[in-house]
Image: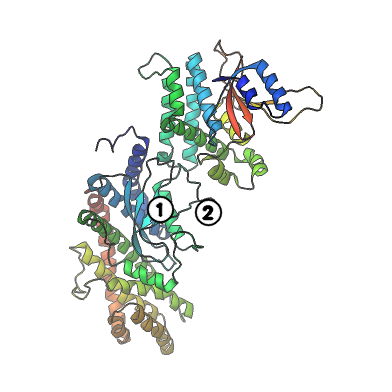
Amino acid sequence: MADKYNLKNPAVKRILQEVKEMHSNPSDDFMSLPLEDLCEIAVLCVWFNGICRGAWREIENIFEWQFAIRGPRDTEFEGGIYHGRIQLPSEYPFKPPSFMLLTPNGRFETQTKICLSISNHHPEHWQPSWSVRTALVALIAFMPTNPNGALGSLDYKKEERRTLAVKSREGPPKFGTPERQKLIDEFAFSVIYCAAEWTWLSQIHEYMLSKAPPVPQPSATEASDEHPRSEEAEALVDSPNPESLPAGERIPDQEGDGIVEEQEVLANANPAGVEVSSEIQSNVSRNELPQRSDTTARVHNPRPETRVQKPDDRLFTLAAIGLAIAIVVLLLKKFIKSTEHGALFSNGS
Amino acid sequence: MEPLSSLAAEYKSGSPILLEKIKVLDEQYAAIRRTRGDGNCFFRSFMFSYLEHIMECQDQAEVDRIQPNVEKSRKALQTLGYADLTFEDFFALFLEQLECVIQGKETSISHEELVIRSRDQSISDYVVMFFRFVTSAEIQMRTEFFEPFILGLTNTTVEQFCKLSVEPMGEESDHVHITALSDALGVPIRVVYLDRSSCDTGGVSVNHHDFMPVAGDLPSASCSSVKNFPFITLLYRPGHYDILYPK
């Protein structure tokens, strides 16, 4: 043990510093960042916390890290949560870390070292001024790029990748010893918690946007823009046991439940948002039809169908209630974040 | 450390111009110290030569002089957006070596130990990397000055050049690197060129170039044993740098 944490070893010193930096740095930047940047930062934030707990408590080898990344926005990976492992060489930071994804994703083979060239020109040009953080951000940026037949790369169709993205939310990958699995599960929980929170925030944001200006005639593109959003929301509802949750009470006494509920509200509210702005009946049905077939085809959830067929004013009421609840939850969350959140994360270390 | 005759032996059946030049060198220089040819030779030669100079002269004034320059580089890196943790270890290790070569302390090391450390990758590579950071920072802080030189070498931006040719280990150094390092630390460097080029005038002479820092505070020539200035002399043969010792 003393050998492994030998501070005289420059690699160990550097790694511990990176761990420390990741642990202490992000939370301040986190809230002040614009929503677009939140995507990556949310990952890193959670990842830091996961890592710190792992690194300090259970992983006996600080050269091996666990991570999870969110699929980049506006790509077929959006909404996906991908777990992976980082192996740091003993010559770190002179030699690059190696990456391995554990969650099937359609871009990189799982359990295979990823050939990650951070600089587009020369893969061998790893430099000590980079860190695990740099590499991870690069990995996210790499996901939507063309693999060009690179070793360990996969070139799945977009639809297949999307399916895998939905599937990736079901839970962390299963592998290794029970102890390791426990660690991964624990880590995954905090990832999913933060990721879901982010999705939720961004959907609120978009819902508000769609409500705010009275758009007389939504164009076809707008309607299709709405698709991936509601799809994703439904995908979230489709997690293990959403049926058992009452849609009424909102105070999340258990975080896991809270997430599912929030997503459900949005799944309800979101299509309504599209319809509110469209007065003409034909327009509504045009919007509805592809949406219905889409959701039923991709996510095997019977409820969207019934919901879409509900009368308009019921949808309005639902939307209004949903919005009101969402705002309350949002405020509550903000409050919790400012008080409890910090304590929650620092618990583990 | 080897006498220059070993250099002559290397080219025994080689170009007569080179042998002539080595003869000229032999008049001025006593010995050559060979450096590992792994692409880091310029920085490694500079490291050893610089630390050895401070050790031989017990040049505390030079240690005091260079420290503000090191701090300036540190600030430059921060300004350029480098995360502290990505360079601080390298800085710390260099400053540590700087302390060690001054005698009379607990941490002081012998000349023999300096040679050992310069061969020890876990120290030597860190100091090399420190110089790479200093060089990169200097180039990026003076983009306008270095841009034309870099465009002459490669067709990249200044930032790309630093990312591809300065910061990665094993990337060979050019006059851009030497100028930047010399300027950043305020240490003059003489480079003697041993190549096949010859003068039209007939007589064989060996070209050298002194890289003189632009900044004001040069090292004082306080050390009596140092007759030559600049006190760092490197021998350049295409693709490689070694250390030369003046007579």
B242 or A254, nearer to the observer? B242
Indicate the secondary structure of the residue bearing disc 1: helix
Residue under mark 1: which chain is it in?
A
Q: Return the residue at label 1.
A: A136
Q: Distance between the residues labelled 2 and 1?
A: 15 Å
Three-letter residue code for mark 2: Asn
Q: Which chain carries label 2?
A: A
Location of residue A66 in the rendering, given as x and y in whole percent from the top left corner: 31, 53
Q: Quadrant of residue A143?
A: bottom left
Q: Which residue lies furthest to the right in this view?
A: B201
Q: Give the left or right position of residue A101, taking residue A120 as reference.
A: left
Q: Reply above or below: A314 against A269.
A: below
Residue A328, quarter of picture: bottom left
Residue type, label 1: Leu
Lateral position of residue A228 relative to residue A303, left or right: right
Q: Where is residue B115 in the image (x, y as percent from the top left)?
A: 46, 23
Residue A246 at x, y = what percent?
Answer: 19, 74
Name which residue lies at 19% across and 63% down. Answer: A254
Work out whether disc 2 and disc 1 sit on a shared chain.
yes
